[in-house]
Amino acid sequence: MPAAIFEQPLRLEQIPSLTYSATPDRFDQTWAAPLATLLGLGRAVGADFVEFFLERKNYISCLAEDDTITSISPSLVSGAGVRVFKGKADCYVSTNDLSFNGLKAALEKGLAIMGLELPGPHSHVPELNLEPLRDYGTSRAKENWLASCVSMQTMGDVLLEANAALAKQATHVQARRAAYFRDWQEVLVASSDGTFARDIRLTQSVGYNLLCADGEHRSSIGERLGNTGDPSFLTAWDYEETAAKVAESAGKMLYADYVESGSYPVIMANHFGGVIFHEACGHLLETTQIEKETTPFMHKKGQKVANENLTAWDEGLSSEAFGTIDMDDEGMPVQRTLLIENGILKNFLSDRAGSMRTGHPRTGSGRRQGYTHAAASRMRNTYIAPGDFTVDELFASVDKGIYCKKMGGGSVGPTGQFNFSVDEAYLIENGKITKPLKGATLIGEATGIMNKISMCSNDISLAPGFCGSVSGSVYVTVGQPHIRVDDITVGGR
Amino acid sequence: MANIQAIAQQAETIAKKLSIHKYDIYGSSVDETSVQVDKGEPKQVKASNRSSVIVRVWNEQDQIGVTSTTDVNETGLELALKTAFEASAFGVKENAPDFSPMAKAPTVVVNLPKVTPAPVPDLIEALVGAEKGVLTAHEAIASVPYNGIAQREIERFYLNSEGAQRCEERSYASIYLYGKTEQEGRKPRAAGAMRFKSSLAQLDVEGCTKEAIEKTLSHLDYEKIASGKYPVVFSAEAFLSLLSAFSNMYNAQSILDNRSLSTADSLETQVASPLLSVYDDELNSENVSAETFDGEGTPTRRLPLIENGILKNFLHSAGTAKRMNAEPTGHASIGAKVSVGLNYLVVEAGKAADDAYNLDQADGVVLVDDLQALHAGVNALQGSFSLPFDGWLIKDGKRISVESATVAGDFREVLKNIQHIEPEAEVTSGGICPRVWVSELSITGEA
């Protein structure tokens, strides 16, 4: 047996003379050596935890207005963020410079901000042993995704055909828009606990926005589809079906009356109706909110927080759903997280810092828009589970109320108050839809509404969405079956 | 980021190599540091240094292609120019944008010197002190969950292949504090304040702290409000929010896209009460981040939008100005499709103020302090809004905080139903505006 060979540990003074040859246009195993050295440097200086997040992005968007392509906009992005923890406090530094010296400068800036000074030149820099690259980018033919995506020519052709289809189906058209984007992202995470993981993501979305006008009457309706992981998503788009749906909604809403404000029982449609749970409850189950003490659910784990008919999930696993990712932006494999089961709060969504600061276990929910943001606990695919009722039974239970068929956006405030706009609403009288209504906003308070969701139908449907919060804008899925909310305040005229 | 001359030289060399004859480049570099604290301790410090450029390339058919990149080096610039050239094959053929005719016109000299950033410990000390001030002001204030202090340095430039070159540097600092109250049997409430200035040294931390305390405490004894129609007074922040949310009314690109509340014929028509005058005034001395040129290199300037209730001008890019026989106004951002947007709004009373309107003596009036969820509750294409707000019901001159409620109406009616504009204007981050009284709007309180 050969004798073990003693290797001299690295000293700080040697770092400027180190040379690395990491692959410039791909994050692979060659990045292990420089990142391990820098992580070791961070630990040597006294940081409790150090993490690098590297990103390359190739983004393109295309817009068709009426019968013209008015914008094709490619964007090429690369950069890195380094996060340094000392105790529970942290510092995040981002840079465009992916060279060894660029990453080192960012790290040293972070260390200095945390009050950690570089030791003398003879000090040792302990070797930090990263795990072998856990490469999610080699699965499901991800390496071929970017090359397999449609050309600029095809993008333009499809959108123009789609806009022509919309023109045929809609009436009183003032403006038509069809928009598409493709977001290809390669990420690499390396941290001082040995994490070393890479992923490739492909997110695409296409949709319509239709503005109709007749005299003083106006309606505007949008519809968006999303996908992760199918390079042929755009060419497979059934735009005739989407156009029919958008044209019908815009036509019905064109002459709608303004809703009369008040308190009503509400039937919320499935699909994007799930934004109500996302805003009113989902955000409040992120550990980010516990850290700030801005969630009424903070001390409610294991307690009843919702109607016993309500079960809800957040996961990153559904095939090609808009919030699906193989690993989160801290290198952790995603999981299916049970949030609420039969009204009982089961789990929070936690990233690394959230787990450290609140004690709730990580759930693969550390997400960020890109390298300029530190990861935070964020939702992925979030939905209310289907129930046992039929949609007809839900409607039959309402004497006078509002059917919220198409939700707009919404938000939740620092005290749990939420609001949503409703893009397409109808009056329900004696269990039947009687007339379209516009201008409705739903307002309420999170803990209250969760107990008022008394009926869930069996027709769950998921919809893509964009969620903006502390770590930027991330792709998510919202979803639910049709639900009945016993009463909710509707703001209107 | 390399200096503008170096980038111009690189671009010229690469363009020649790629046989590109016409291009322009807009770029910026941002150096930013921000701090958040939690009960006296730093929670997170963020620092970033990022650069980006956006290049536009015209092909032989005068079609335009665009690419943006964060790789602001020779390789990145070459890839961006090449990709933009490829994209130009799909550029619009009609009404393609051109260089701004004012890209070489002189700009105003603004006295906003770049300030050396304060050390991070100074930021932390200032914010910890401010947080402590809020926390100790009243036993009901349980936390300051949203707080931050930031300083930012920005360098930006524009250049084109016809020799236009502009660049400038700015720096500014900001602070925000949002306190949250908790009382037994009462819902938590939150409110806060924000300040901007050129540097940490100039930042009114004390004023921000004081305002955050006053606003937070003013919502302690909240009450439900009965749904109905009320006279409404908008704070500066709230009224500026509405003017921005419905900016398609004065946006030439929106008009050309048929996505505006106005048409090309709306100029010189009465769109608001004669009491109202609105200017877009990027170069106003109160604007700590005033930019002297827009994304196309056009100089910025004071532009009357509404004067005595009459719509006077639209915001223009070079392209919209050409199509509508006007001049570019300094409001463009370059992209595959040039967009047009507001800079810095200044609202002034169009005629002498009426002393009959006094909040200290008002009764049954709702003062809307802060409009929320504008991204969700505004239908800019229809002119309608239905928005949650923080505010007070004024009863016999006393302010009673309103529990969760929305205010709804039509923006065009709001402009026409302005009853009074107070004489004293408030400086905010988005502009300058006095409080604005509107005759009647729908308020919905939570049942």
Image (cartoon, rainbow, N blue to C red):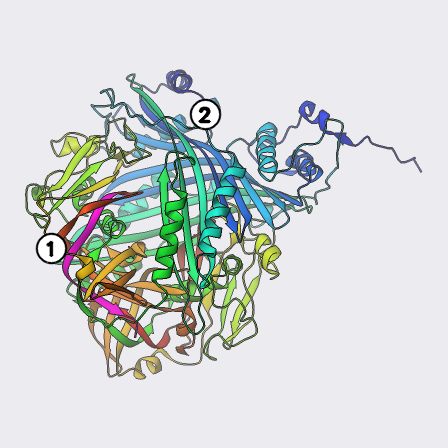
Q: CA distance from mark 2 to mark 1?
A: 51 Å
The outermost residue toward the right is: A1
Secondary structure that dominates the magenta span: strand
Give how far across and how far down residue B343 sits, in percent: 26, 38
Q: Amino acid at mark 1?
A: Gln
User: In this picture, which residue range is highlighted in magenta?
Assistant: B432-447
- Give the total of numbered labels: 2
**Would you place residue B287 above or below residue B417 in this image?**
above
- Evaluate whether residue B239 shows in this view: yes
Residue A392 in the image: state x and y as whole percent.
Answer: 33, 80
Q: Quarter of the image for the N terminus of chain A: give it.
A: top right
Residue positioned 20% across, 38% down in the render? B280
Q: Is residue A121 toward the left or the right of residue B130 in the image?
A: right
In the rendered image, which quarter is residue B25 located in?
top left
Is residue A169 at least partly visible in the picture? no
Mark 2: few/some/many CA within 10 Å (<14, 14-19, 20+): some
Specify whether A456 is left or right of A421. right
Element class at badge 1 = strand
Is B444 within the magenta? Answer: yes
Report the mark closest to the observer, 2 or 1.
1
Residue that carries the numbered disc 1 in the rendered image? B419
Other-residue count near label 1 (Cα within 10 Å), few / some / many at <14 / 14–19 / ≥20: many
Q: Secondary structure at mark 2?
A: loop
Residue type at mark 2: give it. Answer: Met
Q: Quadrant of residue B114?
A: top left
Residue A386 on image: x %, y %:
45, 74
User: Residue B390: percent from the left, percent from the top?
Assistant: 31, 60
Query: Image quadrant for the C terminus of chain A?
Result: bottom left
The answer to whether B314 is drawn above or below residue B7 in the figure is: below
- Subunit under mark 2: B
- From the image, tell me which residue sits under label 2: B1
Front one among B73 and A173: B73
